[in-house]
């Protein structure tokens, strides 16, 4: 996997190629490792954005969570290091755009492709949930296609390890939050399944399952609205049953409340070749609809540079990571 054998990994080991995207806390760049020539995505997080009012660093969930897992269906972390102005995460480069872009370009998605999308997500959850980790921000923007057309889960910035000492968080993108998360109640791994159910519903219906543009509106919808599946694209009855059970508002009755095997063993997924899917030894039905570099912001190499912070900050203790050591 292109291991770097020097004692310390730093920016000197990489060359920036172009900007891939920008978010609330930082930017992501396509980069090449100078010696191995392997392509990576490097996420830069300016330290200024990660310091609280008392001058302490905020929790580094992504850096702390990703070393615990490795899966072909997530954006894996290989290295983490810092400068005086920024934190850097070196991760898998996923080049064929995110699921949101795919859904916009393909407003009618056949059931076979939908099943493949959901199956890839379940593969990602299998690795994540086996460690007791909830992603907490499952949405189309956080699933990205790799070069073979397989979906990978990204952005673990607000992921949590479930425990009795865990802080209850209402963070996440509101339209994909399970009711228990939106209400600020205790949540569990099935909260991720509800979010995936919202995505599947959007694919099947071309709309979200519950109305509302604010937290209060959505909370009212969860209480007052009954889930209605119109099924305009004539998905199978098993598909309708699957998504309805994923979107059960009571987490103790939701599909997956007895474990992820409930999803895998549902009749709708009975024809999935899980063994070959797990090693990406099947063809992606989505690949023919994907184009290299779609949904990616491109800039010429000469104009690309890291953002950094306007001033230097202290080092974050324990941030350095090398998967190959």
Image: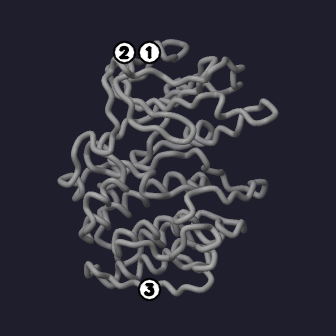
User: What separation in Å lies between label 2 and label 1 (alpha carbons)?
Assistant: 6 Å
- Name the element at disc 1: helix
The quarter of the image holding the N terminus is top left
The answer to whether residue 84 is above or below residue 43 is above
User: What separation in Å lies between label 1 and label 3 (alpha carbons)?
Assistant: 53 Å
Report the number of numbered marks.
3
Is residue 63 in sight in this rendering? yes
Is residue 252 in sight in this rendering? no
Of marks 2 and 3, which one's residue comes earlier in the chain? 2
**Which residue is depicted at the point 77% across and 32% down?**
56
Near-viewer residue (268 or 174): 174
- Name the element at disc 3: loop
- Return the residue at label 1: 13
- Return the residue at label 3: 228
Q: Is residue 275 shown left or right of residue 318?
A: left
- Return the residue at label 2: 34
Q: Position of residue 305 (x, y in %)?
A: 44, 20
The answer to whether residue 221 is above or below residue 176 is below
Q: Position of residue 187 (x, y in %)?
A: 67, 65
Asked if marks 2 and 1 touch (Cβ < 8 Å), the reply is yes
Of marks 2 and 1, which one's residue comes earlier in the chain? 1
Residue situated furthest left in the rendering: 288
Instruction: Indicate which label's residue lies in the foreground, 1 or 3.
Output: 3
**Which residue is depicted at the point 35% across and 75% down?**
205
């Amino acid at each position: 996997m292109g291991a770097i054998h020097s004692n310390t990994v730093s920016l000197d080991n990489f060359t920036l190629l172009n900007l891939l995207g920008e978010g609330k806390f930082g930017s992501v760049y396509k980069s090449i490792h100078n010696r191995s020539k392997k392509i990576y995505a490097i996420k830069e997080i300016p330290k200024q954005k990660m310091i609280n009012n008392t001058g302490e660093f905020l929790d580094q969930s992504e850096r702390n969570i990703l070393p615990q897992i490795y899966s072909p269906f997530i954006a894996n972390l290989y290295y983490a290091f810092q400068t005086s102005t920024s934190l850097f995460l070196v991760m898998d480069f996923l080049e064929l755009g995110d699921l949101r872009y795919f859904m916009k370009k393909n407003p009618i998605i056949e059931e076979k492709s939908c099943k493949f999308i959901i199956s890839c997500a379940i593969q990602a959850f299998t690795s994540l949930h086996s460690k007791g980790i909830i992603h907490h921000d499952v949405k189309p923007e956080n699933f990205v296609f790799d070069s073979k057309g397989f979906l990978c889960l990204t952005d673990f910035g607000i992921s949590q390890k479930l425990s009795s000492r865990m802080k209850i968080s209402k963070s996440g993108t509101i339209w994909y939050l399970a009711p228990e998360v939106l209400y600020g109640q205790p949540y569990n791994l099935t909260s991720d399944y509800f979010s995936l159910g919202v995505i599947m519903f959007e694919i099947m219906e071309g709309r979200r399952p519950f109305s509302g543009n604010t937290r209060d509106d959505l909370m009212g919808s969860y209480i007052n609205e009954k889930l209605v599946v119109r099924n305009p694209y004539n998905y199978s009855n098993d598909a309708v049953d699957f998504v309805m059970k994923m979107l059960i508002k009571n987490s103790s009755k939701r599909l997956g409340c007895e474990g992820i095997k409930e999803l895998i063993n549902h009749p709708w997924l009975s024809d999935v070749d899980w063994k070959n899917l797990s090693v990406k030894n099947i063809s992606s039905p989505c690949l023919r609809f994907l184009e290299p570099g779609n949904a990616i912001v491109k800039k010429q190499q000469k104009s690309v540079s890291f953002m950094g912070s306007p001033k230097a900050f202290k080092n974050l203790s324990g941030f350095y990571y090398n998967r190959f050591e």
